[in-house]
Amino acid sequence: MSFLKIAFGFLVTAFVSATLSLAYSGLGFGWGGGGVPGGQFGAPSYGLFPRFYQFSCPQAEDIVMSVLEKAIAKDPRMAASLLRLHFHDCFVQGCDASVLLDDGATIVSEKNSLPNRNSIRGFEVIDEIKAKLEEACPQTVSCADILAMAARGSTVLSGGPSWELPLGRRDSKTASLSTSNNNIPPPNSTLQNLLTLFQRQGLDKVDLVALSEAIRPKWKQPARRDIRKTYYYGLKSVCPKSGGDNNISPLDFGSPVKFDNLYFKLILWGKGLLNSDEVLLTGNVGNTMELVKAYSEDENLFFEQFAKSMIKMGNISLLTGFNGEVGKNCRFVN
C-alpha cells in the first residue's frame, strides 16, 4: 500500500508539472537547459518567469530600484550606462553576467575588449545591488538577473517604458574576450554589419532599430564625418583637430539623460553623431528608414517595440536550472 501511495504521488506530480508546462509555457515552468538565441516575445522563456523570486526573495525588485534611484539621482548618465551594460552582456555568450567578471586565474575579463575598455560603466552600482541582495537573500538572485532588472529599472526611471521581465537566469563561470571583440557592434558599423551581428543573436531589423537607443552610450567622443554644418561647428570646440581624445559629447544632445524618441528625430535631422546612427536612415537595407520615421512620429509605438525587443534580447543563450551558478560576488566565480 505504501508503494502504491508513493507511485500515485509521483504520477500526480508529473501530471501537474506537465499541465503547468503546457498551460503556462511562456512562463517557463520547470528547469530549462541553456536557452537558444533570440527567444521570441510571448514565447517560452526557457526556464524564466516574472515571479521567479516571489517566495525566495520577494523584496528583490524593491532593493534594485532603491539603489538605482540613488545612483541615477547622483549621476543621471548612469541610467543609460546600465541599460547598455545589459546589452554588452547579452551579445557575448548570452545574458549570463560574464561581462561583470574581473580577470582571474581562469578568467580573461571581457572588460578589456576593444568595445568595452574605457566605455562600459556602472559596475559599482551592480556591486551595491548585489551586496544588498546578499544581505537580504544570500546566494539567491543571480548577477545576470540583476543586470536585466537594472536595465528595466533604469529605463523606467529615465521616463521610458516598463515590461514584465522574465527572471531565473544563472551566471556564467567563464568569459570570452574574443567573442566580446567580435560580437559587439562598433560605432562605425555599416547597416549590413549591424544586421549581421543582430541576426547572429536571433534578432532582426525591427529589434536593431528599436534597441539602437540602448546599444550606444548617451555620451561619446565626437566622431569626424559628414554631418549637418551647424551641428558640426557646434562640435568643433569639443573635438579639436588635434588632442581632445578624452573629451565627450552627448550623442542625444536634446535629452541626454531622458529616455524618449528624440534620438530618431535627430537622425532624421542629420544630427546622428555616429555612423551606426546615420546608416539606419541611409543604409538602404530593409525598411530601417521607415522604422526610424515611424518611431520619430509615435513615441508610444517605439516604447512598445522597445519593451518587446528587450524581452527578446534578454532571452539570448540563457543559463538556467542547474547550468551556471548564482554568483556570491558578481566580479568573481564562486
Image (cartoon, rainbow, N blue to C red):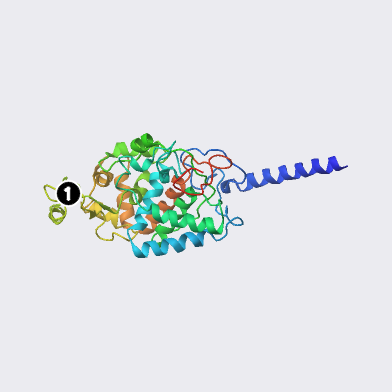
Q: Position of residue 322 (x, y in %)?
A: 58, 40
Extreme front residue here?
105
Extreme right residue here?
1
The residue nearer to you, when weighing 11 against 42, is 11
The residue nearer to you, when weighing 226 against 294, is 226
Q: Position of residue 284 (x, y in %)?
A: 26, 40
What's the amino acid at mark 1?
Ile
Q: Is residue 198 left or right of residue 139?
A: left
Q: Give the residue number, with chain letter if any, for mark 1.
A: 227
Q: Position of residue 92 (x, y in %)?
A: 41, 39
Q: Can residue 151 be spotted in the picture? A: no
Q: Residue at x 14, y 48 (%)?
A: 243
User: Up-down: is 250 above or below 177?
Assistant: below
Q: Residues within 10 Å of mark 1 (few under 14, many from 20)?
A: some
Q: Residue at x 37, y 62 (%)?
A: 72
Q: Quadrant of residue 161?
A: bottom left
Q: Can residue 239 be spotted in the picture? A: yes
